[in-house]
Image (cartoon, grey):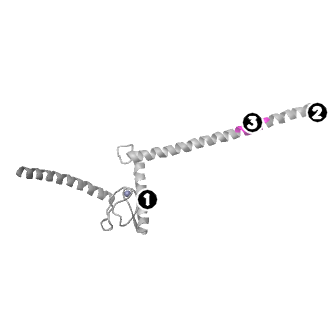
Amino acid sequence: MPFKDSISKIAKSVEGSAKYVAKKSGDMVEITKLGREIASQEGKIKNLYYELGRLFYERYGGEKDFDKDISDICVQINEKYKIILGIKEKIASLKGMKICPRCGQELDIKIAYCPMCGTKQEMAEEVIGVQDRDVKVDENKELEKECEKDNASDESNEHGDG
Ligand SMILES: [Zn+2]
């Protein structure tokens, strides 16, 4: 093989591989870019899943007729919220404050109504569980209804008599 030919062959081959390397590194940049785009879209999907779960929990978290897997997660979320509320109450009591059981707002211990949500606050002596209080409220409502009925019939009787 003449020396000149072999030189030009080598040159061509170098040129070729350089082009290949250039193309390859261009592709690599492009692939990295596309990979980042996938990661970005996946991040957005993750946020949407979060939002979907949050909305679902807020709207249907209390219902028990759902798929067991879904209710289990809702129950777990509930438990975590209860733990957080307990911790918030601890922190508040360390500061001489209390936590509104409805909205979680930190309040002065002497405040009777939450300025954020208007919920009547239990005073220090009569602090009872949220659930117990809800039941009591319902009972009171029912009692009120019955009282109203009684009053209404009493009044009609009175009117009838008078
Ligand atoms: Zn509140």
Q: Specify which label sits upstream in the sequence, 1 or 3.
A: 3
| Mark earlier in primary sequence (3, 2) | 2
Residue for point 68% across, 38% down? 30
Is mark 3 in CB contact (under 8 Å) with mark 2? no
The circle on residue 3 is: 2
The residue closer to the viewer here, 53 or 152, is 152
Examine the structure image and report whether residue 26 is included in the region drawn in magenta. yes
Determine whether the residue tagged by mark 1 lies in a helix, strand or loop. helix
- Identity, as a three-letter code, of the amino acid under mark 3: Lys
Task: Give left or right: position of 140 versus 150.
Answer: right
Residue occupying image coordinates x 46% and y 43%: 52
Question: Mark 1 — residue?
Answer: 84
The alpha-carbon separation of the residues under discs 1 and 2 comes to 82 Å
Tell me how far mark 3 sits from mark 2, CA to CA.
30 Å
> Which residue is depicted at the point 77% across and 35% down?
20
User: Label 2: few (<14), some or many (≥20) within 10 Å?
Assistant: few
Residue type at mark 1? Answer: Ile
In which quarter of the view is residue 81 placed? bottom left
| Residue 69 in sight | no
Give the quarter the ligand 1 occupies.
bottom left
Q: Where is residue 143 in the image (x, y as percent from the top left)?
A: 20, 55
Give the number of callouts: 3
Which is nearer the N-term, disc 1 or disc 2? 2
37 in the magenta segment: no
Residue stretch in magenta: 19-27
- Residue sitting at x 63%, y 43%: 36
What is the magenta segment's predominant secondary structure? helix
Label 1 and label 3: CA atoms lie apart by 55 Å
- x and y percentages locating residue 162 in the rendered image: 6, 52
Q: Is residue 21 above or below residue 97?
A: above
